[in-house]
Image (tube, grey):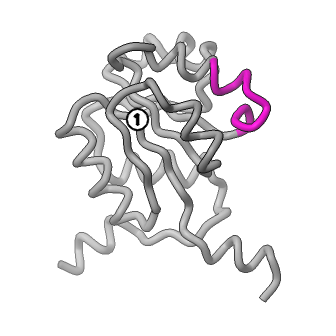
Amino acid sequence: MSDEKKRNSQQPLVLVVEADEDSLLLMNYALDLIGCKFICQNNSSNTVLMAREYQPDLILLDIFLPGMSGVEVVRSLKQEPRTGSIPVVAVTTFDMDERELILDAGFDDYITKPYLIEDLEAVIRRILKRKFQFYKAFNLCQDS
């Protein structure tokens, strides 16, 4: 099997940084349905270190975190040579009026809470641009 085919057959690794335990549980459930592997943490203190060590394919980052805010974290991530190219999606309660602020801070995209699993799946697919084989979360839910 070629390296490209091996890469396409692997599940994407997502680093989730979410302060709210209920939101973290929902995110875990959604990522599992979509077919992603994930690492979770509920504060910002080790995000850059974890991103450097695990080299995730995507980071889903809550904006409102204890300690460093999501905006401060994304700026640190984008300045690091080993993490600067990892796409980071803001998970926020901001509305569309804050879109430019989020993107100007260095995020690649954002999703607004509350979100549907299908919306999260669409953002992940758009960011990872079909690099991976995903399950269709909506279809899996319909089969149950």
Query: For the residue carrying disc 1, how many other residues have a C-alpha within 10 Å: few (<14), some (14-19), or many (20+)?
Result: many
Horizontal side of 105 relative to 80 (left or right) equals left
Where 24 falls versus 6 (above or below)? Answer: above
Is 57 on the left or on the right of 99, as rendered? Answer: right
Picture mark count: 1
Q: Which residue is depicted at the point 29% across and 28% down? A: 19
Label 1 sits on what residue type?
Val
| Residue 135 drawn above or below residue 77 | below
| Residue to which mark 1 is pinned | 17
Q: Quadrant of residue 132?
A: bottom right
- Viewport quadrant of the C terminus: bottom left
Where is 57 relative to 3, above or below? above
Q: Main secondary structure of the magenta part?
A: loop
Up the image or down, 78 lies above or below 100; here it is below
| Residue 104 on image: x %, y % | 63, 13
Does residue 72 show up magenta in the picture? Answer: no
Residue at the limit of the structure toward the bottom, as seen here = 1
Task: Assign a secondary structure to mark 1.
Answer: strand
Image coordinates of residue 57 in percent, x first then y, are 61, 51
* Towards the viewer: 61 or 33: 61
- 82 within the magenta span: yes
**For the N terminus, which image quadrant?**
bottom right
Stretch in magenta: 76-85
